Image (spheres, rainbow, N blue to C red):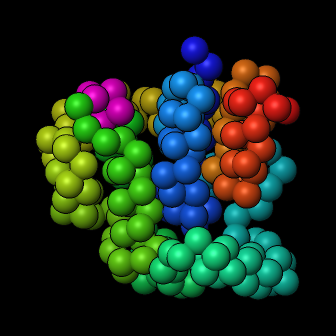
Amino acid sequence: MVQVDYYLALQSPYVYLAGRRPAEIAAKHGATLVYRPLDAMALFPRTGGKVRADRHPSRNAYAAQDRMRTAKRLGLPLDPEPMFRSANPAPAAYALIAAQAAGGGDVTGFAVAIARAMWAEGKDISDDEVIGAALTAQGFDPKVADRGMLMAAETYAANLEEAVSKGVFGVPFFVAGDQLFWGQDRLDDLDLFLSGAL
């Protein structure tokens, strides 16, 4: 069975725009999707990128327009400047890692719910109540994050190192064997690759 490693940061608007599609594409082709949340702010400088604050204003302005167009095309609400955009994403990432390890619920649903909480619902994704509510809604014990915190923190750090070693330089990023796909706008290519057409 093919495995697709999904490197993501839950605060990324492009992870929000990707939604459930990565999981749907993997399921369609009988592939296993493994979520590998990481610290994007640490990834970018190590791989030649820049965090948003350090990018030229024209790049940020274009990206903002592009996100709004994409959201409109997908029928998704998107706040261009969410209130809690600077929230620490690590607690939600730890919860995702712990939930994936525990099983028994909808991991994709949790990832989508957290991204939606930031980009469409004006919520703080570092807040324990927001995380707990998302876990519960997706069939997980809300305490799973607390029980798995040490393992999740270690995995979160390891995901960053693994990502750098595999050539990952942004989020969302998909790795299937030796094939790399960067961005939610490359999901069609991932779909074609898994079908054998690429």
Tell me if residue 74 comes above or below residue 36 in the rendering. Answer: below
- Residue 60: quadrant of the picture: bottom right
Please name the predominant secondary structure of the magenta segment in the image. Answer: helix
Q: Quadrant of the N terminus?
A: top right
Tell me if residue 191 comes above or below residue 13 in the rendering. Answer: above
Residue 41 magenta-highlighted: no
Where residue 176 sits: x, y (%)?
69, 27
> Can residue 193 be seen here?
yes
Residue at horizontal 79 percent and vertical 72 percent from the top: 55
Q: Nearer the viewer, residue 132 or 103?
A: 103
Residue at horizontal 64 percent and vertical 76 percent from the top: 73
Q: Is residue 31 left or right of residue 195?
A: left
Q: Nearer the viewer, residue 9 or 56?
A: 9
Q: Quadrant of the C terminus?
A: top right
State how many labels appear.
Answer: 0
> Can residue 44 be seen here?
no
Q: Nearer the viewer, residue 10 or 161?
A: 10
Region of the chain picked out in magenta, as a range: 99-103
